[in-house]
Image (spheres, rainbow, N blue to C red):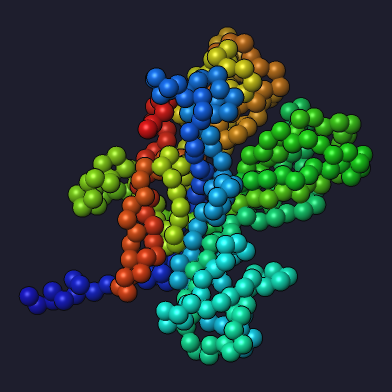
Amino acid sequence: MPGAESQFRTFQSVARYEQALTRHAQYIRWTRAILCPCLNATTRQPDPQCSLCSGHGYIYYPPNTQAYNPYPFRIVQEPIRCDLNGKLYPKFDIATSPNPIVTLKGTGLTVAVTSPFDGSLQLSSSSYPKQYEPLLLSYDHDTVLTVTDEDSTVYDSTNFVLQVTTPVFTERDTTYIGTIVEVTEVYNTTKTETYTVSSFDRDKIYLSAMGTWEVGDVLEVDYKYEKPFSFMLIGVTPKLRYEQPWLLEEAEAVLITPYWAKPSSNDLFTVQSSEQRGSAIIDPTHTAGNDVIRNYYDISKIIKIILLDGTELTSGFSIANHNQIKWASKPTQRYTIHFLYNSTYVALTQLPTLRTSENKVFANRISVKLHDQLTDMTRF
């Protein structure tokens, strides 16, 4: 049939997916999920009073904090060339462990991380490949950035909340916020006091107390944070659902990355490029401590709170742990809360990877469903 041969062309390549991501990808915060031990063995439902999961049934944490293989992305067979001194410079921040794999025409080469580490790799051979010979490098991508001695701002002195600036960045006229994954120290250099950290969330650090802090004191913070990841988010078309119905029956969208990602079912992916309005009715007598807005995971701003007696509150509260309300003095009556939130998707399955024309794995697709469309019941 004339022109039929054009149907069999393939243009799949890592470079083309990287270009598509540059044009169309969105910054998305990835949060891992593991089952909470509070789940009832008979009903399989979580304890609404649980202090670990706040009644969600899952404990959430950043993707790089797991003890075993903590790096969420694997760069597979990145084309690379060495310089005259046998050094390799990967495109992404490389994890120093486990050791990366370098091959030349299918033969493995011995490579070591430079010491002191400067982001490069050193070939161990005495005779290096020629500069025009393409090598293939596979390695884990370390997504965590370290910040030391940053001057923080007291965001809320009543609730002992600090705010840092480095995780916040602007791109394409939109402001994005990374996620703090570890706080090493909070130190008041003016009063020579070290403060205890109770928790942290996005660009906020929550302290147990602030000692003798006064306005004007300098608070230095050492911490690690993770920038949001670039994923291409596409809706599930009838054609795609027809081709893979056993994988996409419940999916509402698909996330695509040109690298080997390692998600798990029920992981959360929060889109940061747009905000939507939401509202909920909260009964503060149901839980001790922070109130939880269960069906919305990522609250970005509280617009208004109205108590049952009609009183409108404008202060004395703050957002904590993505979707919790931290009170200076918790109300005793039901209230309506109006807020802005970022849409969050729940991972359902990891679809088979796409492949290049050379039959090399290079892209992941993750089927997802909107989190705020789910019920409070734990999904299995």
Q: Position of residue 339 (x, y in %)?
A: 54, 30
Quarter containing the C terminus:
top left
Image: 38 above or below 346: above
- Between residues 150 and 88, which one lies in front from this camera angle? 88
Quarter containing the N terminus:
bottom left
Which residue occupies 77% across, 42% down? 153
Which residue occupies 89% across, 45% down? 189
- Between residues 369 and 332, which one lies in front from this camera angle? 369
Q: Could you tell whether 146 is left or right of 190 in the image? A: left
State the image quarter where residue 2 is shown. Answer: bottom left
Can see residue 277?
A: no
Q: Could you tell whether 192 is left or right of 86 in the image? A: right
Image: 188 above or below 257: above
- Between residues 39 and 10, which one lies in front from this camera angle? 39
Q: Position of residue 18 (x, y in %)?
A: 44, 66
Q: Position of residue 307 (x, y in %)?
A: 58, 14
Which residue occupies 72% across, 48% down? 223
State the image quarter where residue 251 is shown. Answer: top left
Can see residue 40?
A: yes
Q: Could you tell whether 133 is left or right of 67 in the image? A: left
Question: How many numbered badges does the structure rendering display?
Answer: 0
Q: Could you tell whether 237 is left or right of 46 in the image? A: left
Q: Position of residue 30 (x, y in %)?
A: 51, 47
Q: Residue furthest left?
A: 1
Q: Residue furthest right?
A: 191
Which residue occupies 62% across, 31% down? 319
